[in-house]
Image (cartoon, rainbow, N blue to C red):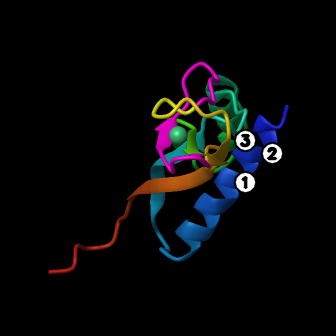
Amino acid sequence: MHELSIAESILDAVRKEIALHPGAVPLRVGVRIGSMAAIDEEALTFCFEVVVHGTEWETLKLETKVIPARRICNSCGNTFIIEDYNSVCPACGSEDTRADGGDELDLEYLEVETDEAPVP
Ligand SMILES: [Zn+2]
């Protein structure tokens, strides 16, 4: 179950971000997951709740967004989104295509609450 280690690395990333903003409390963290990364969103959300539990940020919520996998056609250069694991180029019908991302895991945003006075 690699979702647990992924959840921990997301929390690590949040810690690093928060370290730069003393006094800030993280409320929501958003990640983008490539559909080819073989990450179960529900399992990841559950694991994240587990790793956050017992920290000072129990209210921190994880939001995930799946990015569809793309392929590039080696014959005509067309870029397309894979549906149903069909990797044939829809433009020219070639099977000679290569993956273009799809296994990413990126921190998209981090929403924090600060008790600092707003800067005028
Ligand atoms: Zn093509």
Q: Which residue is mark 1?
A: 9
Q: Is residue 58 visible?
A: no
- Mark 3 and ligand 1: say if the CB distance to the nearest ligand atom is below 8 Å: no
Identify which residue, 77 or 82, lies in the foreground: 77
Q: Nearer the viewer, mark 3 or mark 2?
A: 2
Residue 86 position, x and y percent, is 62, 23
Q: Is residue 114 visible?
A: yes
| Residue density around tag 3, few if under 14, some if 14–19, many if 20 or more, within 10 Å | some
Q: Amino acid at mark 1?
A: Ser
Dot 3 or dot 2: first in sequence order is 2
| Residue density around tag 2, few if under 14, some if 14–19, many if 20 or more, within 10 Å | some
Dot 1 or dot 3: first in sequence order is 1
For the point 74% across and 49% down, which residue is it? 8
Main SS of the magenta segment?
loop
| Cα–Cα gap, marks 3 and 2 | 10 Å
Q: Which residue is mark 3?
A: 51
- Indicate the quadrant containing the N terminus: top left, top right, bottom left or bottom right: top right
- Indicate the quadrant containing the C terminus: top left, top right, bottom left or bottom right: bottom left
* Disc ID at residue 5: 2
Q: Amino acid at mark 2?
A: Ser
